[in-house]
Amino acid sequence: MQLVSRILRLAIPSIATFSSMTFTGLLVLMIVGNLGAASIAVVGIVNIIIYNLWAMFSGVQASINYLVAQNNGSGNMSEGNQRMQIALLIGAVQGVVLLAGSFVLPYGILYLMGSNEEILSLGAPYLQVRMLALIFNLFCIVFFAYMRAVGNTTIPMYLSVFNSLLIVSLTYVLAYGKLGFPDLGLQGAAWSMVIAEAVTLLLCAAVYFMGLHKKYLTRKWVPIERPQVKLMFMESIKLGVTELSNSIGMLVFTACITRLGTTAIAANEIALNILSFGFMPANGFGAAATIGVGQEIGRGNRTEARRFGIVTVYLGLVFMTFISIVFFFFALPIAKLYTPEADVYNTAISLIHLAAFVQLFTGAQIIFGGGLRGVGDTTFLSRVALVLNWCVFIPGTIILTYVFDLGQVGAWTALIGLIVLQALANGWRYLKLNWNGVKATTGSAPVAAAGGH
C-alpha cells in the first residue's frame, strides 16, 4: 500500500495537469466550433502541425525528466542543475528557430497537406500565431519536467490549471469581442494562447529560480561540462526521434483525412480530441513511472524500480478501463457536445467507438514507455517508434484509406494497429530488461541491456 500511495501522489497531480491541457483543447474547440466547421477543421490541422513542431524539440524536456529524476535519487542535484542549464540554453536556440519559421512556413505547410482555399486563408495566420505560443510553451514544459523530476508534481498541476483557465477565458473574450475587446474570431483563439503561455512561463521561472533555490540551489551557475552537453544532445535526439516519428505518422494520418473533405476533418478532430481524454490517466501514470523508476535507479534499487513500473501499469489500466466504458456507451451525446451539425457528429460516432476499444493498449504503451524512459532505455524507444511508424502506420494509413477506399475508418484502423504494436513492444521490453545491469545514466556510460531479469 505504501508503494501504491507513492504512485498515486505522483500520478494524480500529473493526471490533473494533463487533464487541464485536454479540457483546454476541448473547451477551445467548443468555443471555436460556433465559428463553423471550417474553424474546427483549421484547429484540428494546426494542432497536428504544432504537435509535429513540438515533437522536433521535445527531446530536451523528456531528457530532463528522467535524467534529473536519477540525479534526485542519487542526491547529485548539482549535476541535475547543470543538465537543466544546458536544456534552457538549447531551448533558447529552439525559440529563435521557431520565431524565424513562423514568418515563412505556415502557408506552405498547410498547402503541402492538401488544404483547400478556405482552410489556407483561415489557417495560415492562425498557425503563425500558434508557433509564437509554442516558443513559450517549450520553456514551460522544461521547467515542468524539472519540477516533476524532483518529485514535485503539484506545482505543475497548479500552473497548468491556471494556464488552462487563462486560455479558455481569453479565447472566449478575444474570439467573440467580449468585454469591450475586438472581435478577432479564430485569431483571437491563437493570441489567447500566446498571452497565457507567456504569463505561465514567467510563473515557471519564478518557481524555479526563487521557490526551488533554497533546496536545490537553482540560481547557482554550475560550470558546463562537455560530456553532459554530449549526453543531453544525444538523449534529446533519441527522445525527439521517438516523438517526431509518432507525430509525422499523425501528420500523414491527418493529411489523408484532410483530402476527404471538411466534414471528415471536423469529425476526425472531435474523435482525436476525445481519444486524448484516454491519454490523461495514461500520461499521468506514465510520468509517475518515469519519475519513480528514475529515482529508484538513481538510488541503486533496481528491483524496486522494476516493481514500481509494473504496479504503476496495473493502477493505470484500472483508470483506462473506466474511460473506455464511458466512451463506448456515450459516444453520441459526447459528440454532440462539440458541434450541432448532424453530419459531423454522426460521422464521429464510429471513430469514438474505435477510440474506446484502444484505451487499454494506449495505457500500457504510455506507462511502460514511461518506465523505460526512467531507466534511460531511450534507444529502444526511438527504434520502435521509427520502425512501427514508417513501416506499419504510415503505409497502412495510405493503403487502407485510398487503396481499399475505407476512408477515415481505414486511417483509424491503422492508428489502432500502431498503438497495439507499441504497447506490446514496450511491455515486452520492460519485462525482459536485464535489470541487474541497469545503471544511472552518466555523460559517458550506456544503460540497460535486454534479456533476463
Image (cartoon, rainbow, N blue to C red):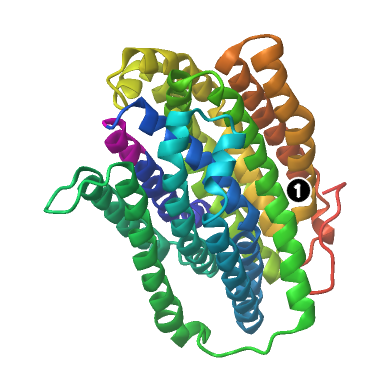
Residue depicted at x 77% and y 64%: 234
Residue 2, image x, y percentages:
50, 56
Q: Which residue is mark 1?
A: 382
- Can you say whether 336 is above or below 108 in the image? above
Between residue 268 and residue 447, name the one nearer to us.
268
Residue 74, image x, y percentages:
66, 75
Q: Is residue 176 left or right of residue 156?
A: left
Instruction: Indicate the amino acid at tag 1.
Output: Ser
Residue 264, image x, y percentages:
47, 19
Q: Main secondary structure of the magenta part?
A: helix
Residue at the left extreme of this rendering: 180
Asked where in the image residue 75 lies, by quadrant, the reply is: bottom right
Q: Is residue 131 left or right of residue 239?
A: left
- Mark yes or no: residue 319 visible: no
Q: Which residues are magenta?
A: 26-34
Residue 323, image x, y percentages:
43, 30
- Can you say whether 228 is above or below 171 in the image? below
Residue depicted at x 86% and y 47%: 452
- Mark yes or no: residue 429 visible: yes
- Can you say whether 419 is above or below 55 in the image? above
Asked where in the image residue 149 lies, by quadrant, the reply is: bottom right
Asked if residue 188 is among those painted magenta in the image, a careful observer would answer no
Q: Is residue 240 left or right of residue 85?
A: right
